[in-house]
Image (tube, rainbow, N blue to C red):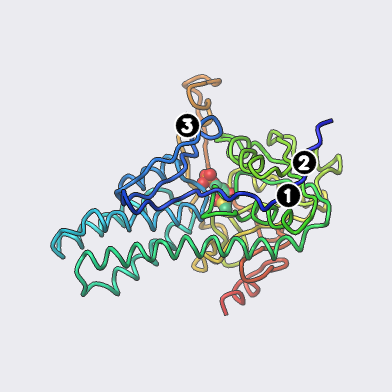
Amino acid sequence: MTIKSPIRSPPRSIETLRWNETSGRIELIDQRILPARFEMPGYDSAAAVANAIQSMVVRGAPAIGCAAAYGVAVEARRLRELASAGFAAGMASAFEVLANSRPTAVNLFWALQRMQTVLMSTQSQAPPAIADELLREAHAILAEDIRANRAMGVHGAALLPDTAQVLTHCNAGALATGGHGTALGVIRSAVEAGKRISVLADETRPLLQGARLTVWELQQDGIPVTLITDNMAGHMMQLGVVDAVIVGADRVAANGDFANKIGTYMVAVLAHRHRIPFYVAAPLSTIDRQLVDGRKIPIEERNDAEVRGFADQRWASADVGVRNPAFDVTPAELVTALITEKRVVLQPNSARIAALFD
Ligand code: MRU
């Protein structure tokens, strides 16, 4: 049996997004090629950042929000020598292209709204000064996200027993955020607090965020992780080796229903059947108070090719009909607790979620 050595120092942090002042580019870990290769290309226009979001170079709700903010900031920097009218028109197109990159994660629209507010409040200034303010706001959004994840980590870690095996679906880690992670942030914080936590990672078909990203991240930190295919979760619960489930969210409706990676609903139903606590870790920026419940959350449908195969491998016939919803909606009644940066909300419902914003 291989015994993993205990962590002796705080885990190294993964920088999913990094601002490069010299080049004026936002650098993003290319998550499409992990874990085979680690590359961090730079992006210097809103269209290039929107394309990186759409093609999932960067993914995960909070990371998408941070990337979109920098998409606005790099565009402002690129256009800052233009006269005010040209600059304003260019910025309007930047917001549009970024808003159309992916539909489900509300953090994208939340971050764009914050950037829009800064743009509006600086309208009387010259473009170079506006560009500086927009970059400052993008930095603030990134820093706040990391702080929120750390706070969620502390709140969530208290919910876990001293020794536990936690099942997670998709990747809600440092790679999906500005750093530390939401669901994996809770696990990291619990480990930092001295708890003995191991992780069961669902591989997460079709794009394998669990197998490729969650496993890679946890191995960087020396946190024990075991990989299972998605259809093994129920069996593992029956065997009694799952003590808790923690997932992230792409959008939480006002009543606590939430969208997350396709397959999350299945895991929540199984956890309920086996009386296993099911936790959702999400910052306030993921809560969409405009939607009364989960029924109106827009669910992204992606390319058929993602289901017929992976990368250049294809295992299904090219002419078979395919459905590829990237997310599903889990009703709030299946959620034991929503972990936010403000506090833990047990059995979330409309009143308890509204109280978070008081
Ligand atoms: O399609 P993805 O990889 O962007 O989906 C990501 C997820 O579903 C995550 O679980 C969610 O964004 C939470 S990330 C902290």
Does the residue at mark 2 contact the one at mark 1 (Cβ under 8 Å)?
Answer: yes
Residue type, mark 2 in image: Ser
Instruction: Identify the residue under disc 2.
Output: 5
- Distance, label 2 to label 3, CA atoms, is 42 Å
323 and 340: which is toward the camera: 340
User: Does 186 sit left or right of 243 as displayed?
Assistant: left
Residue type, mark 1 in image: Arg
Task: Where is residue 353? Give x, y as percent.
Answer: 62, 71
Circle 3 sits in a helix, a strand or a loop, which is it? loop
Does the residue at mark 3 contact the one at mark 1 (Cβ under 8 Å)?
Answer: no
Task: Where is residue 146? Give x, y as percent.
Answer: 54, 60
Q: Which mark is residue 8?
A: 1
Q: Is residue 39 above or below residue 125?
A: above
Q: Categorize mark 2 by other alpha carbons within 10 Å: few (<14), some (14-19), many (20+).
A: few
Q: Categorize mark 1 by other alpha carbons within 10 Å: few (<14), some (14-19), many (20+).
A: few
Task: Where is residue 196? Give x, y as percent.
Answer: 80, 50
Quarter of the image where the N terminus is located: top right
Quarter where residue 209 is shown: top right
Quarter where residue 347 is shown: bottom right
Instruction: Identify the residue under disc 3.
Output: 304
